[in-house]
Image: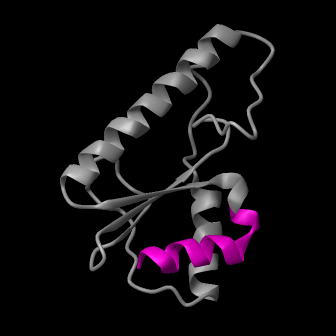
Amino acid sequence: MGLIRSRGNRTTELRLVRIMRRYKIKGWRRGSKLPGRPDFVFPRSQVAVFVDGDFWHGNPRKKRLPKSNTSYWQEKIRSNRARDRKINRALKALGWRVVRIWESSLRDEEAVAARLRLLL
């Protein structure tokens, strides 16, 4: 496991960038220093957007665990979800609205764009 290096969620973030550009959603920034380091922030609307990977954040509709070392992966995903809840609470306490978008939901671009527009 130590040899596996993270490459982040760059491809999912770039998919969301394409969606926001295609639907002319403006005002977003990347690289925020807010708690949890949101993938995108809309400073004027105070909306923080996270693009969560289905596996790493335990999407209940796409849940598939590896067949080996199952207990490790269950605990890892459980702790990731607990950290997500903690980050959501911290951002809400600062007055931010939090949007979490599943990686698999990026396939329905119109729904993602409509959800973002509703909050902005």
- In the rendered image, the vertical position of residue 11 relative to residue 21, given as above or below: above
For the point 28% across and 70% down, which residue is it? 46
For the point 27% across and 80% down, which residue is it? 44
- In the rendered image, the vertical position of residue 28 relative to residue 66, given as above or below: below
For the point 57% across and 34% down, which residue is it? 5
Is 111 part of what is drawn in magenta?
Answer: yes
Q: Residue furthest bottom?
A: 24
Compare residues 11 and 28 and report the one nearer the observer.
28
Helix, strand or loop for the magenta stretch, by majority: helix
For the point 54% across and 21% down, which residue is it? 76
How many labels, in total? Answer: 0
Q: Position of residue 112 (x, y in %)?
A: 62, 70
Q: Position of residue 114 (x, y in %)?
A: 59, 78
Quarter of the view holding residue 107: bottom right
Q: Quadrant of the C terminus?
A: bottom left
Q: Residue furthest right?
A: 67
Q: Residue furthest front?
A: 118
- In the rendered image, the vertical position of residue 67 relative to residue 39, given as above or below: above
User: What scheme was used to colour the molecule?
Assistant: one colour
Q: Position of residue 79 (x, y in %)?
A: 46, 24
Quarter of the view holding residue 14: bottom right
Is 79 part of what is drawn in magenta?
Answer: no
Q: Position of residue 33 (x, y in %)?
A: 26, 56
Range of residues picked out in magenta: 106-120
Quarter of the view holding residue 10: bottom right
Q: Quadrant of the N terminus?
A: top right
